[in-house]
Amino acid sequence: MPMGEGGMPASANGRGRTGGRWIPADPGEPRGFPGVRPGGVRAGRSAEAVAARICPARGRDACDPLDILAVSGGAAGGAFGAGVLAGLTRTGRRPRFQLVTGVSTGALIAPFAFLGSAWDDRLVEAYTGGRAAALFNVRKALPGMEAGLFRARALDALIAPFIDAGLLQAVAAAHAEGRRLFVATTDLDRQEACVWDMGRIALLGGRGDAAGALALFRDVLAASASLPGLFPPRLITCESDGQAYQEMHADGGMAAPLFVLPEILLRWPDVGRRLRGARVHLLVNTALETAARVTPGNIPAILVRSFETMLRYSYLQAVTTTEAFCAGAGLPLGIASIPGGGDPPNLVSFETANMREMFAAGLARGCGANPWSFPDLRGPEGSASVPLDRHARQQTGVDLQVDP
């Protein structure tokens, strides 16, 4: 039975109304932007139809490599991921990623990872320029004014200078070439992940409502990065059966700490064939290895350490799931994550010095001899997946040409 807000039963026509919002029986689409959520079950599509949008069938003689990048959450740890990409650019080893996905802070990184090295200046400035420290200052927080420690406009002010009309035009052009950019949010009303086709949003904006596309693009990024308690969730206006309604979306990491493909494709028997020759890269903006240390007994320290622990285990599970998927599909897997050991980074501190320190660690990783490796998470026997660096030369290519 369809449910209204607060878990109240919806009316017979599927429009449960409580507090001015309602949830339709069938999820709709953002008004004016059809087909921007290719998630399969939500959109009523089969795995094959979703695959046709994301990774269509290709010939064995394709020559261009298919590099896939999944960028995780990690709050301030996103500075590490920005550093890795900058390091790969500096050493001339940055792949031209055909498929990029992002969650939470990874959603903010994903457009720049997708567009390539020419956009590094914006990415580096966003994470090291001091804007986050100025906007996310606890002394300026207004708890109780909105459903978060910081107001929504603070996150908007971080995103807007870097995500503009020019960036959307570049994303639309890459989408038209067959490359794909996806971001995940968490639909709080339905308690499920929601995958957004950011390239299609940009493409549709170029064909009509450019201002609406830019607003939706920014809203999706902001929703994905809205960590509960720190930032309020976002209401996104959608339409179902001609009726407008609002969906509440928040931090994508709650439902999908990181993702390579929509969940429906992970269980699809033909996914290995569709991705033949692909290389999977995970950019994990937290430490996966254990870092033992004494936790102080004060409330802030306990909260921070608890957040770090929760984050680490959620990402360990996500990495293990990805490892199993890659092993089953015969895909090489490489990971870049924040180094463990020593003093762990403070992932909830947006102070500029802290962000720059994590950026420097990422830059060193990206410039290092082996930026993509697989950390030993399961003891001496190691991983069942294929390390990316050992098999990169054996890969065949793939052509992702798709009708936009």
Image (tube, rainbow, N blue to C red):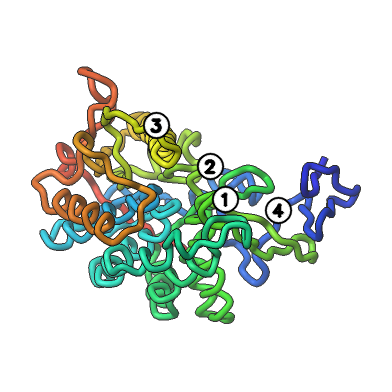
Q: Quadrant of the N terminus?
A: top right
Name above or below for residue 9 compared with residue 327. below
Q: Residue beneath label 2, please?
A: 255
The alpha-carbon separation of the residues under discs 4 and 3 comes to: 46 Å
Disc number for residue 194: 1
Q: Residue furthest front?
A: 298
Dot 4 crowding, Cα within 10 Å, few <14, some 14–19, many 20+: some
Check disc 1 and give the amino acid type.
Cys
> For mark 3, what is the residue?
297
Q: Secondary structure at mark 4?
A: loop
Q: CA distance from mark 4 to mark 1?
A: 11 Å
Q: Amino acid at mark 4?
A: Pro
Task: Answer few, some or many: residues within 10 Å of disc 2's Cα (few below 14, many 20 plus, some between 14 and 19).
Answer: some
Q: Earlier in the sequence, mark 1 or mark 3?
A: 1
- First along the sequence among labels 3 and 2: 2
How far apart are the alpha carbons under marks 2 and 1?
9 Å
Q: Secondary structure at mark 3?
A: loop
Work out whether residue 386 or residue 379 is closer to the camera in this orientation and state it: 379
SS assignment at label 1: strand
Instruction: Answer with mark 2 or mark 1, whichever residue precedes in sequence.
Output: 1
Residue 106: x, y in percent?
Answer: 39, 54
Q: Which mark is residue 27?
A: 4
